[in-house]
Image: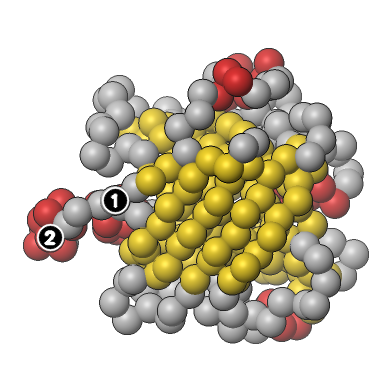
Amino acid sequence: MQKEMSLALRRAVTINCFQKSFHEYPVMPDVTHPLHYTEHRPWPLPSTPWVMAQVWHDLIFAHWPIPAAQMAALLPPGLVLDTWEGEAWVAVVPFRMSGVRPRLLPPLPWLSAFPELNVRTYVRMGDKAGVYFFSLDAANPVAVALARTLYHLPYLRAAMSCEGDGDGIRYRSRRTHTGAPPAELRASYRPVSPIYQATPGTLEAWLVERYCLYSVDRRGRIYRGEIQHAPWPLQKAEADFETNGMAQAPGLDLPDTPPLLHFARRLDVVAWAIQPVDGGR
């Protein structure tokens, strides 16, 4: 691990990321201070202190429905697929991160800001519905090494860019991680509506308002990581996917239908250390 981290630190990381001020866009009052807004949570906050803070910017959720049997076959043993009206869903989620830092420490310029691109579906253990990631591509090799070790998440190195295009984003990602299936995304997207919150009980809320993640270590042991943020400040969106091979990498076939799209300009997040899940709780 020390050798891997030393090599990662010496790698040059080129991040060309959109830096337009957040204050140039209309925002909701609840976007910041994630611990100040907890009434929307489906269960109480953890009793232990959070350990990691981060800010997510210029994000789009691109969701497609997937047959439940096809999705369930790709999950690790022990995880229970979560479905909406009998269908599973997969999301391709490009965005950029900033302010990534441990509790009580400031962000570090060479570590705390980078593009990230997730492929995720939805699972549950007991009464806690959460997110399971098939992949998390990132343009920072140090962050990749740390997240793989500390959170057992399938982070992968990638060459990435995230650039402003008027009120939208041009996003490029090409996976470079040795031994990982190749995957590439080339997309442009932008918001097309005012900001709103998803209505509880709707598909939108079911997809995005999730407050834990699940990961699996090499021995097959399942872990849960709690997160907290204000309700998502969503906007309707439009997107042009020039190349999208992200979901195909883990073995999913996307339907030939337009994705369900939601944009978010910024969301402040805190996260807790992962904990092993015992007996499906």
Numbered circle sitting on residue 14: 1
Is residue 77 positioned above or below 211 on the image? below
Q: Between residues 218 and 85, which one lies in front from this camera angle?
A: 85
Q: Residue 159: give x, y in percent of width and height.
A: 36, 61
Residue 34 position within the rendered picture, expressed as x and y whole percent measured from the top left: 57, 24
Query: Going 58% across and 42% down the picture, which residue do you hit?
Result: 165
**Residue 255 in picture, x, y percent from top left:** 78, 77
Q: Which residue is mark 2?
A: 7
In this rendering, is residue 61 above or below 268?
Answer: below
Dot 2 falls on a residue whose secondary structure is helix
| N-terminal label among 2 and 1 | 2
91 left or right, relative to 134: right
- Is 274 situated left or right of 201 in this image? left
SS category of the residue bearing label 1: loop
Image quarter where the C terminus lies is bottom right
Q: Quadrant of the N terminus?
A: bottom left
x, y percent for residue 244: 60, 71
Residue appearing at x 88%, y 44% in the figure = 201
Marks 2 and 1: CB-CB under 8 Å? no
